[in-house]
Amino acid sequence: MPRVSFTFRGLLAPVLTPFNNDSTRTLNLSVIPQYANHLANKKVNAVLVNGTSGEGPSMSTSERKLVAEAWASAVRTTKQHLMIQVGGASLPDVLELAKHAESIKADSILCLPELYFKPSTSEQLKDYLRLVSSAAPNTPLLYYHIPIFTNVNVHMGEFLESLNEEIPTFVGIKFTSPNLQEGARALRANNSKFVVFLGNNELMDAACAIGMNSFIITSLSMFPELTVEAFTAGNAGNLLKARETQQRLTKVLTSIGKYGTFIETMKAAMSLLTNINPGPPRMPQQPLSAEGVASMAKDLQNLGFSVNL
């Protein structure tokens, strides 16, 4: 059995990192307590910091520590589960970030693979994660599978099947892929020993149908009610309602997504739909033009959402 306990299941929000609208996109940490309260008020009781949506690999090690510390402080009030993504940097920095996450009492750690000298086998991936685990020996560790960005294609069903007790703190994965055949094998691997968080905004209904019960979903920040409704219906086995709600969520996400990349459009949508201003993304991504924001606002209104103008 793992050396650590990890009992969290359900919905977890991968939070955006707020930047100032200056030339280098400096951190705007003052937004984070407000952001935490916004999610808590919408019954979102877990957050992922410095992930893809949080632009973790675009920040320095010191910046990532500051963001993690700000969230650690905020969740002491909101009582949210705090997961911190520590990968996407050189190995010494990854190990330093893992140690830091444990020192600020993160509830769990998520880790990308090495992004340049990529692992190509389960054994290579295990060797890497074993080092990360040893840097934070008292904190649950999850692997972040997102091949569209990492181009690391180790099969997650086979990887989890191959795990015995080599990584004492390892408890599961974030599975950000549309390949639900692979996801189902991961879910059932090793007698369903490991938690699998699906990281796909548009497949909750299908994932619930194959038995998944945990999701890391960016739409929780912008569309918490709709996302929670789709999850609740799917998790209760009401697959017809889950499908209908998922279709509404997918429709609005598709409408937003046509204006730019995922993070560019999510940041714009968050400013339009909530009282949280996450600021612009960091280079090479760009904020949407004023015309793009105005057009997105009109689309959201046409779909029945109230927007800030």
Image: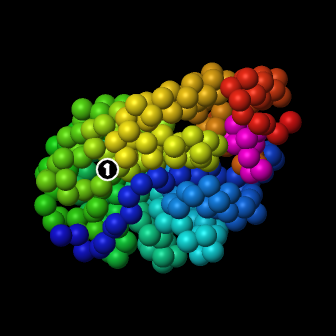
Can the viewer see residue 50 in this picture?
no
Q: Is residue 297 magenta?
A: no
Q: Residue furthest right?
A: 309
* Amino acid residing under circle 1: Val
Looking at the rendering, the stretch of residues picked out in magenta corresponds to 267-276
Residue 250 screen position, x and y as percent: 53, 28
| Res 151 quadrant in image | top left
| Res 41 quadrant in image | bottom right
- Vertically, is 287 above or below 28? above
Callout 1: helix, strand or loop?
A: strand
Quadrant including the N terminus: bottom left
> Label 1: which residue?
196
Can the viewer see residue 143 in this picture?
yes
Magenta segment main secondary structure: helix
Q: How many labels were placed on the picture?
A: 1
Give the residue drawn at x 67%, y 63%: 37
